[in-house]
Amino acid sequence: MKELVEFSRKYGSDPELVLAGGGNTSMKENGVLYVKGSGCSLSTIQAENFVAMDLEKLLAVLKKEYPASDREREAMFLADVSAAKLPGEEQKRPSVEALLHALFPQRYVLHLHPALVNGLTCGIAGEKTARELFPSAIWVNACKPGYTLAKLLSDQIGPDTDTVLLQNHGVFYAAETPEELEKLLQGMMDVLKAQLPGELPEELEDVDLSKPFTPDHIVYCGVGPTLPDTDNARLLYRDAQKINWYAKAFGGSLPLKKELVDFILNWEAESYRKKKA
Ligand SMILES: [Zn+2]
């Protein structure tokens, strides 16, 4: 647990890797998944902010049939995930991606939203470039987060999967040790940096808030005509400007599909994260 808290804070404190309540981490030990609670900030996380869950019970959620309606499915899914919490954890709420963490066989999972990686995941040529630069990584086209994403990945993640790139979202790394996580992250950053035309300029082009790049931008900046007057909104706006610039090296930037923006705007799980911010 000490190692989990340590690397969570280390990566959570680097604004190039994750901002506000974004990103999450987990550890598996003796059939228990310890996953970050929804909405807490990785930078200041403590051992008690992780939610202890029965790994087997959590994975059994994948075998259930859910209704097609977003509202009904998400409510049932939330209840089933909640039921996998260990006794004593009832008051806590696990990250919306808890089930995805459970799918990786490795001990540690690190999920980040680095602007540089999102330059690739939000790039028009992102998928093609990712397949060339990171042939062993899984690329997932933008889809509904939570249940839909985990279900989609459940038959793709194998024992050797250590990297998953999520279009318009971020990246997952999985490894047996924190040192290996660091290697995966740094290796990817170095390869991506080598694709850029130069250093990130201080002055960056404005971006259109009505066309967010990632769920973070929706949660913290909204999709209205003006930016909310909060520090997190300003941080995430700058993040969107950076993604837009980095994406020029990957065919230009592609915003989230309108259908997904609408889903996230109406998703109870993200309004929970917003409230905690
Ligand atoms: Zn995320």
Image (cartoon, helix red, strand yellow):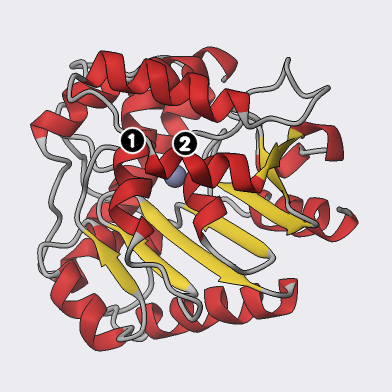
Mark 1 packing: few (<14 Cα in 10 Å), some, or many (20+)?
many
In front: mark 2 or mark 1? 1
Q: Tags 2 and 1 in contact by the CB under 8 Å rule?
A: no
Q: Amino acid at mark 2?
A: Leu
Q: Going 63% across and 69% down the picture, which residue do you hit?
A: 106
What amino acid is found at the position of numbered circle 1 in the picture?
Pro
Q: Is residue 91 left or right of residue 246?
A: right
The residue drawn where x is 69% and y is 75% is: 176
Q: What count of labels does the image hold?
A: 2
Residue 9: image location, x then y, percent: 75, 50
Quadrant of the image occupied by residue 116: bottom left
Q: Quadrant of the C terminus?
A: top right
Image quadrant of ligand 1 equals top left
> Residue 55, how many percent across, how many down?
64, 47
SS assignment at label 1: helix
Decide if residue 93 is in sight here. Answer: yes
Q: Is residue 51 above or below residue 92?
A: below
Disc 2 to disc 1, how far (Cα)?
14 Å
243 relative position to 191: left or right: left
In the picture provided, is 223 more to the left or to the right than 271? Answer: left
Q: Answer yes or no: is residue 16 visible.
A: no
The residue to which callout 2 is attached is: 235
SS at mark 2?
helix
Residue at (80% x, 57% y) in the render: 30
Q: Earlier in the sequence, mark 2 or mark 1?
A: 1
* Label 1 CB sits under 8 Å from any ligand 1 atom: yes
| Disc number for residue 215 | 1
Q: Residues within 10 Å of mark 2 (few under 14, many from 20)?
A: some
